[in-house]
Amino acid sequence: MKKFTLLAATAMLSACGGGDTQAPPADTSTTDTTMQTPAPAAAAATPTDAAGYVAKAGAGDMWEIESSKALRAKSQRDDVKAFAQMMIDNHGESTAKVKAAADAASITVPPPALDPEQQRMLDEIKAADAASIDAVYIRNQQAAHDAALALHRAYATGGDTPGLKAAAGEIVPVIEKHIAELQKLARAGPANAG
């Protein structure tokens, strides 16, 4: 069963990347630095147990919120600032949704903790100057959303707690919307500075 879940998660990750604007991994000649960060390691290990799912979902939401707050302080683009505010709002809502489902199932929700890759991406955003922060943020958001989509899809289909599976299933379309918005932001470039 674990091998099947891993294979299914791998297939989902492959399917997720089909419609995006990322260059194939073998193409190292690209100069588009907004697309060169691989998805976080969290995407490779999508837990189907409630505790693992809740921990990863909480960390992902915390990263989205904290990285978006950091972006809003320096961003030059009104469209990226608006996206960041949507991340703060939507990921606050998804945290509440997962927590409510976990509470209903008598699952203890530990305080979220960023994994090393999430911390690295957050540090990169915080360290970016005003001229580069929008591109750095968009690139890292794309990687984080790919991981989040894999996490929530895998738990929605193979999770062990019905209420959390339902919550994960409700979160998937929100993440898909975020990915579509990120693709638009990446294509728009710095022309929308405000």
Image: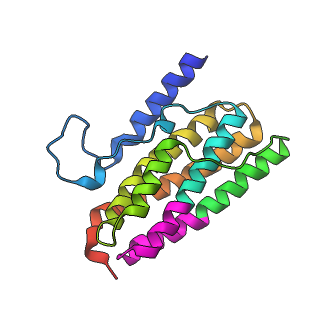
Front position in the image: 170 or 126: 126
State yes or no: residue 81 in magenta: yes
Q: Is residue 132 left or right of residue 65?
A: left
Taking the image as drawn, is residue 161 in sight? yes
Front position in the image: 146 or 34: 34
Looking at the image, is 25 positioned above or below residue 110? above
In the rendered image, residue 136, in percent from the top left (x then y), is placed at: 35, 59
Q: Main secondary structure of the magenta part?
A: helix
Looking at the image, is 145 positioned above or below residue 53? below
Residue shown at 49%/22% (left/top)? 7
Looking at the image, is 133 positioned above or below residue 17? below
In the rendered image, residue 65, in percent from the top left (x then y), is placed at: 56, 61
Taking the image as drawn, is residue 141 in sight? no
Residue shown at 58%/35% (left/top)? 154
In the rendered image, residue 96, in percent from the top left (x then y), is placed at: 72, 57
Looking at the image, is 121 positioned above or below residue 128? above
Bounds of the magenta span? 66-89
**Number of residue marks:** 0
Residue shown at 30%/66% (left/top)? 132
Among the 4 quarters of the image, the one containing residue 180: bottom left
State yes or no: residue 47 in magenta: no
Quarter of the image with the C terminus is bottom left
Q: Residue furthest left?
A: 29
Quarter of the image with the N terminus is top right
In the rendered image, residue 138, in percent from the top left (x then y), is placed at: 38, 59
Q: Which coloring applies here?
A: rainbow
Residue shown at 49%/52% (left/top)? 176
